[in-house]
Image (cartoon, rainbow, N blue to C red):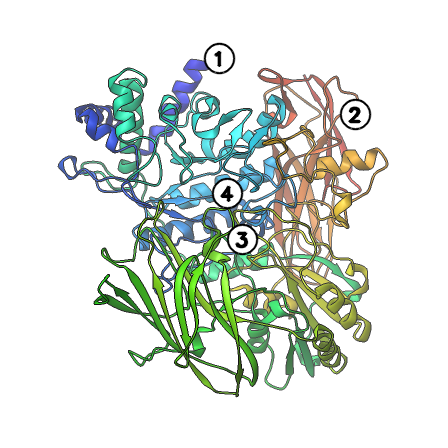
């Protein structure tokens, strides 16, 4: 087929969500605008929205961070959001249906908050487990990522809200992310990194795409030809390419397929772009096309008068229920010796819950993915609520995880001005007069673009904090800039706190701090008064102030000994270990895969005195588990969203079945990982591994006699057992034709459960370099005890292809490998591609 005709046909299909005459009307409307108006529309009006043109009925288009919740235009905890589990948890469900409901909740939340476009999903691959944003991405495999991303996008857009697959492209690391150059050969670029995006565009028809900060093969993303081909030409993308915030670097980006520069109103376009058009450096036609695409987006989301929005809205979903469902369905059981789980509450007299993350769970990763939920349920809280009243639940922290200041617990704060819980925040003019004030609930305050009244010179925060227990307490403040802090009437700090990082926004979540020790009695109330001087000039309107407490542990071994005694006296010990936002976040990569602090020692010590030890891992991405074979059960819970603790309790007590499968490989040791580097060398991150990423790299390494992983891609246990019958597939197919593999499945256990059938391809005698095997398709089934089903796994024709200047198919025999994970004892079928 003629590729130009194919692209035109695809574009018509993409426009099917608008009336037939809409395209001509949009182009006419775009052409009716003056050049100044057109150029104005191409840069944001502020941090989170585009310009409105009331004369043509165009409202502003509001964009908001996702991808695991919709924050809206502010970081105000009073404007709470549903907090869904991290994308790594979503991908562990191996369920497109779950991904679609996940997206629907986000679309629903966006509409509630007046948001037109969600900045997600994040679908860069898990190239290295050290990637700082690993938790926010989906998988190491392009097929699993692509299918789930398409489900997510279709769910968001079914609510009349645009989804924004990001970050396009080859943005698998955070170190030097603004300047690094990802050097990737054409074949892996096409077969892995572009393939992860493709279904979200060609199947789900995403209305936006976000270009990344990094360069790809020497050209920054916002100026890269990849925005045109394959995105626009081959895939027929007719939506808006929005930059990552500050990702447009020059007027030259206007000659590329980049459409919208964010944030605004000041950037590299604006007056500079107007001049470039007037002197011929940028064509008027290019500007007109960009404006048409922005108007098309406005029409789709209902921000342009005279155009019907693109979709009707489905029945409203219960966001909290979906959050819980994803946490359950994504939890991966990786060890269960002797059937320790599920626990029978009727046979329990006491349970020891141990671990810092048991009480202060990490339910979301750090960075722009952060939202402000109304509540979160910790594993300790979830278990206390779920267990009968006659079961004694004890708690021991065991090992500190969170370093530095942590926000005060909301229940411990009292507003001394308004007499309500929380804090009083007052905005002051230069002469000290009050401009306005507000009652806030939390002690971590962030303003990014909105919320601070014009004319504000200083921000005052007043609260009273009550110490729950006696002892030395370490109170303080974290921010960037000049601040004065008084506690109980005595000034403890008055000076400048300076940011020593080059990471945009790092001060949001890990600011420089000043901390001071106080002897406290149980129930003692401390009056805290802080006055922050707003900088006179801010390149980006970003202010963050954290009032809180740091947990200081004078004797770590004493905490472990207390945990040992609690575990020794209990029928079962539940140890929750994990990471936090200082380890897994946007803006930096991880240094290692170790659990922070003394958590490994804690697990070993508890397991030594109680063989009925269950470990729950609360991390967004892989961690090392040197104690895996010395504990009874291990459940990977990821960053589990606001219902994390409820989901953990339901799984441990057998109300729900852990249904997850690993979306990425977990190593036994850092030195075993075949693809690890995230740090640019001479400004470049070279993807020297080519097509061998994730389990593909591990399999190649093993074939050469190297180390195997601790846990293979696709692995996961349950509370029941399954048997796969004899699979059937066509023995011969023409190139370019999808095939379906039929696999009988029977639940041979005593409980209802879910199985995921995974089909891989391999070709040993090939003229083309190939992975040992690669995922071609998957499908799940939910069966009662004794139940049977025949699962249909669709294998797209592209799975047999390879890229060499275009998509090619090597004719001949391929093996279809049917199993449960990437290292299974597969059932093999032969299929001839002719």
Spatial CA distance of label 2 from label 3 is 37 Å
Spatial CA distance of label 3 from label 1 is 41 Å
Q: SS of the residue at dot 2? A: loop
Q: Which residue was labeled with disc 3?
A: 86
Q: Which residue was labeled with disc 1?
A: 1
- Residue 759 to residue 363: above or below: above
Q: Residue 304: which quarter of the image?
A: top left
Q: Earlier in the sequence, mark 4 or mark 2?
A: 4
Residue in view at x 48 percent, y 58 percent: 511
Q: Earlier in the sequence, mark 1 or mark 4?
A: 1
Q: Which residue was labeled with disc 2?
A: 764
Spatial CA distance of label 4 from label 2 is 34 Å
Q: Nearer the viewer, residue 454 or 468?
A: 454
Where, quadrant-wise, is the C terminus in this rendering?
top right
Spatial CA distance of label 1 from label 4 is 33 Å
Residue in view at x 53 percent, y 48 percent: 136
Spatial CA distance of label 2 from label 1 is 31 Å
Q: Is residue 525 visible?
A: yes
């Amino acid at each position: 087929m003629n590729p130009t005709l194919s692209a035109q046909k695809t574009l018509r299909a993409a426009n099917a969500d608008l009336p037939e005459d809409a395209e001509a009307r949009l182009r006419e409307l775009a052409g009716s605008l003056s050049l100044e108006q057109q150029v104005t529309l191409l840069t944001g009006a502020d941090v989170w929205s585009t310009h409105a043109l009331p004369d043509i009925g165009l409202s502003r288009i509001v964009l908001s961070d996702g991808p695991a919740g919709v924050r809206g235009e502010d970081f105000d905890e009073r404007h709470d959001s549903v907090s869904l589990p991290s994308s790594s948890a979503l991908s562990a469900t191996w369920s497109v249906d779950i991904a679609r409901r996940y997206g629907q909740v986000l679309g629903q939340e966006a509409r509630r908050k007046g948001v037109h476009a969600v900045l997600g999903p994040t679908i860069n691959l898990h190239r290295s487990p050290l990637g700082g944003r690993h938790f926010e991405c989906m998988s190491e495999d392009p097929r699993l990522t692509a299918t789930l991303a398409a489900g997510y996008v279709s769910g968001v857009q079914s609510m009349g809200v645009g989804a924004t697959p990001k970050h396009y492209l080859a943005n698998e690391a955070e170190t030097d992310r603004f300047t690094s150059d990802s050097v990737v050969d054409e074949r892996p670029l096409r077969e892995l990194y572009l393939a992860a995006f493709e279904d979200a565009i060609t199947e789900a028809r995403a209305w936006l795409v976000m270009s990344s900060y990094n360069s790809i093969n020497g050209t920054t993303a916002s100026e890269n030809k990849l925005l045109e081909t394959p995105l626009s030409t081959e895939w027929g993308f007719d939506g808006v390419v929005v930059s990552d915030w500050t990702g447009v670097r020059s007027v030259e980006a206007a000659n590329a397929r980049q459409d919208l520069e964010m944030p605004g109103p000041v950037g590299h376009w604006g007056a500079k772009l107007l001049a470039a058009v007037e002197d011929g450096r940028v064509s008027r036609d290019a500007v007109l096309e960009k404006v048409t695409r922005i108007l098309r987006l406005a029409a789709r989301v209902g921000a342009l008068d005279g155009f019907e929005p693109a979709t009707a809205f489905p029945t409203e979903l219960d966001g909290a229920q979906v959050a819980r469902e994803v946490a359950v369905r994504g939890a991966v059981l990786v060890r269960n010796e002797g059937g320790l789980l599920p626990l029978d509450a009727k046979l329990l007299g006491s349970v020891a819950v141990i671990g810092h993350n048991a009480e202060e769970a990490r339910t979301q990763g750090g960075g722009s993915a952060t939202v402000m939920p109304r509540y979160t349920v910790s594993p300790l809280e979830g278990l206390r609520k779920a267990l009968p009243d006659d079961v004694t639940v004890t708690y021991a922290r065991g090992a500190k995880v969170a370093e530095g200041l942590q926000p005060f617990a909301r229940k411990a704060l009292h507003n001394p001005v308004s007499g309500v819980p929380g804090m009083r925040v007052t905005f002051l003019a230069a002469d000290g007069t009050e401009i306005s004030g507000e009652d806030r609930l939390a002690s971590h305050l962030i303003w990014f673009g909105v919320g601070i009244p014009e004319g504000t010179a200083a921000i005052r925060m007043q609260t009273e904090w009550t110490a729950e227990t006696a002892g030395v307490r370490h109170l303080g403040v974290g921010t960037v800039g000049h601040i004065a802090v008084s506690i109980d009437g005595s000034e403890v700090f008055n000076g400048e706190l300076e940011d020593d990082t080059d990471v945009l926004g790092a001060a949001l979540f890990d600011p420089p701090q000043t901390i001071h020790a106080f002897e406290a009695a149980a129930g003692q109330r401390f009056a805290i008064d802080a006055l922050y001087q707003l900088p006179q000039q801010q390149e980006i309107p970003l202010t963050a102030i954290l009032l809180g407490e740091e947990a200081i542990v004078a004797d770590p071994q004493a905490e472990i000994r207390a945990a040992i005694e609690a575990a020794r006296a209990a029928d079962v010990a539940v140890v929750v270990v994990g990471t936090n936002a200082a380890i897994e976040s946007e803006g930096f990569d991880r240094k290692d895969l170790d659990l922070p602090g003394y958590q490994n020692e804690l697990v070993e010590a508890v397991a030594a005195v109680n063989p009925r030890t269950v470990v729950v891992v609360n991390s967004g991405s892989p961690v090392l588990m040197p104690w895996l074979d010395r504990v009874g059960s291990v459940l990977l819970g990821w960053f589990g969203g606001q219902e994390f603790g409820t989901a953990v309790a339901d799984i441990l007590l057998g109300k729900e079945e852990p249904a997850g499968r690993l979306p990425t490989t977990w190593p036994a040791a850092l030195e075993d990982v075949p693809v690890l580097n995230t740090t640019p060398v001479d400004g470049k991150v070279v993807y020297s591994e080519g097509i061998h990423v994730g389990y593909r790299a591990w399999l190649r390494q093993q074939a050469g006699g190297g180390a195997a992983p601790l846990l293979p891609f696709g692995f996961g246990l349950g509370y029941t057992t399954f048997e796969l019958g004899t699979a059937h597939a066509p023995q011969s197919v023409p190139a370019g034709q999808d095939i379906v593999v039929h696999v009988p499945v029977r639940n041979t256990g005593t409980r209802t459960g879910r199985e995921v059938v995974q089909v891989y391809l391999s070709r040993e005698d090939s003229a083309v370099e190939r992975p040992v095997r690669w995922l071609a398709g998957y499908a799940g089934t939910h069966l009662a005890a004794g139940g049977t089903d025949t699962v249909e796994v669709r294998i797209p024709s592209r799975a047999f292809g390879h890229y060499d200047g275009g998509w090619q198919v090597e004719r001949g025999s391929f093996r279809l490998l049917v199993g449960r994970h990437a290292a299974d004892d597969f059932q093999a079928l032969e299929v001839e591609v002719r």
